[in-house]
Image: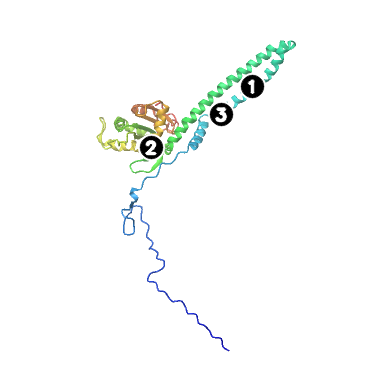
Amino acid sequence: MAVPVRLIPSPPTVCLSTPLLSLPPIARKPSPSSSCSGSSRARPGFRCSAANKPSPPPPEVSNSSSNSMAKIRSEVLSPFRSVRMFFYLAFMASAGLGSLIALTQLVPALTNPARLAGAAETLRGLGIDVAAVAVFAFLYSRDRKASDAQVARLTREENLSRLKLRVGAGGRVVPLGELRGSARLVIVAGPAEFVEESFRRSKPFLKDLMDRGVLVLPFPTDGNTPALQFDGEAEEGENEGDGIGEKSKRLWQLTPVYTSEWAKWLEEQKKLANVAPDSPVYLSLRMDGRVRGSGVGYPPWQAFVAQLPLVKGMWSGFLDGMDGRV
């Protein structure tokens, strides 16, 4: 007997007028100089532009890194201080041990009349040991204070060397430390009028300052831009062909970057020197980046010329560290 076969109907075919998944076309990445504005696919009023992108935040300065570098520089500048402090501690320990031994001998001698004759000698030795401990403790404390003061000063100089500046108009941004060994930096910080007057007073000494490797970094603290006329007329006694405008640009070619960090560092220096926060100041650096001197008021350009050695000639390498008293 044949078994009837039941046919299962196939499911109906559904035709979709649109695809199940529609992928938008891949858009080409816009160039940094291009901008995009709102369209039918974007939110109304949306607009972006690479030219309006905010500048990156200033880099953080690691205090531990600056302190470590300052300690290394302190060891280089004062190589025998650590040796002296080690011997001071050794002599203090030796004298302290001698004092303890003398004290243990003095107490029984004072209580025993039979041993009273040697008490005077023991007391004299105890006095010598105590005096030695006091003297070496004073010498150790003096060297420790000098070391701490030097490390603190070098730490501030290391923090200064990490501040950013721009070389020339539209030039590259470099840390101040990259100028070590090639330039003697003079920082002129004050209102825009103070910077302009400092610029005017430097004009008679442009060539001499450049021969001594001096570069000036103007820092207007009032937020205004000083009007420095680089293409002005020649000063009295100079010819038009001397290129005073070009020399001025080369001497005053630095510009601070991240001025908030510069202002913070300068405020700390004024606080340490007990100078009013709104006082215009100048700061001069040596060829190796150490602070040579500072003061309130206009930079003494004539004194720089008189005291700083030339960066070229037979004495240039020998006198690089002898940057005068200014």
Q: Name the secondary structure under disc 3.
A: helix
The residue depicted at 47 percent of the width and 33 percent of the height is 155
| Mark 2 / mark 1, whichever is N-terminal | 1
**Amino acid under disc 2:** Ser
What is the tally of numbered marks visible in this picture?
3
User: Residue 131's spot in the image, x, y percent?
Assistant: 60, 17
Q: How dense is the environment of label 3, judged by Cα within 10 Å: few (below 14), some, or many (20 and up)?
A: some
Q: How dense is the environment of label 2, judged by Cα within 10 Å: few (below 14), some, or many (20 and up)?
A: few
User: Residue 10's spot in the image, x, y percent?
Assistant: 47, 78
Tell me the tag on residue 82: 3
Report which residue position mark 2 lands on.
260
Query: In this rendering, would 187 be left or right of 127?
Result: left
Give the CA distance from mark 2 to mark 3.
37 Å
Query: In this rendering, would 147 be left or right of 236?
Result: right
Nearer to us of marks 2 and 3 is 2
Q: Is residue 312 visible?
A: no
Nearer to us of marks 3 and 1 is 1
